[in-house]
């Protein structure tokens, strides 16, 4: 299990650094730790092609797909980086890493705009999508 945790942490760190470089201008000096998503917010992440969604609430993540609408739950540990929120855990015996970074994200299938980008790694599979919270909702139609 420790090998998977290290792999997940390394994947998350690399992904976070890559997304930070894409979404942020270079700033000299120290950067404050990301604190835009509080511990008590319910986070929803979603993606298309393939379709998937995650709801994260108080350290518990529920991952659903069209093939598994009931979903699979996992406990996740969160940590804040310089330009986003990271979470690690294990899902179905695979290392799980989640990176959430600020930016206007589109799911390319609706007229919605989401306040966060999401990158999820489950084992060797990477999922890309968007995210929002109960306190920071998406903009656009409620049911496209």
Image (cartoon, helix red, strand yellow):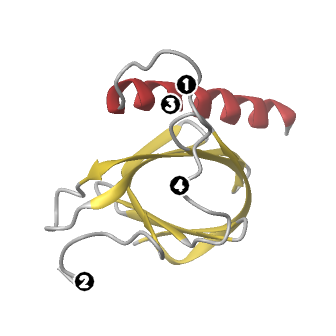
Q: How many labels does the image show?
A: 4
In the displayed structure, 36 sits above or below 111; it is above
Q: Looking at the image, is mark 3 or mark 2 earlier in the sequence?
A: 3
Q: Residue 142 carries which label?
A: 2
Crowding around mark 4 (Cα neighbors within 10 Å: few <14, some 14 to 19, many 20+) is few
Question: Label 3 to label 4, Cα distance in Å?
Answer: 19 Å
Numbered disc 2: secondary structure: loop
Quarter of the picture holding the C terminus: bottom left
In depth, the one of 90 and 15 nearer the eye is 15
Using the rendered view, name the quadrant where residue 12 is placed: top right
Whole-angstrom CA distance, mark 1 to mark 3, is 4 Å
Q: Mark 1 points at which residue?
A: 14
Residue in the picture at 50% in, 25% down: 17
Dot 3 or dot 4, earlier in sequence: 3
Residue situated furthest bottom in the rendering: 143
The residue singled out by tag 4 in the image is: 36
Residue 36 percent location from the top left of the image: 53, 55
> Which of disc 1 and disc 2 is earlier in sequence?
1
Marks 1/4: CA distance?
A: 21 Å
Q: Position of residue 3 (x, y in %)?
A: 81, 30
């Amino acid at each position: 299990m420790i090998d998977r945790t290290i792999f997940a942490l390394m994947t998350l760190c690399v992904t976070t650094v890559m997304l930070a470089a894409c979404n942020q201008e270079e700033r000299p000096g120290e950067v404050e730790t990301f604190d835009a998503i509080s511990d008590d917010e319910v986070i929803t992440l979603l993606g298309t092609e393939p379709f998937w969604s995650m709801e994260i609430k108080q350290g518990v993540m529920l991952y659903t797909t069209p093939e598994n609408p009931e979903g699979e739950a996992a406990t996740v540990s969160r940590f804040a980086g310089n330009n986003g929120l990271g979470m690690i855990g294990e899902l179905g015996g695979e290392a799980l890493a989640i990176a959430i970074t600020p930016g206007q994200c589109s799911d390319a299938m609706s007229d919605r705009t989401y306040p966060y980008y999401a990158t999820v790694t489950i084992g060797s599979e990477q999922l890309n999508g968007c995210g929002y919270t109960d306190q920071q909702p998406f903009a656009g139609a409620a049911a496209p």
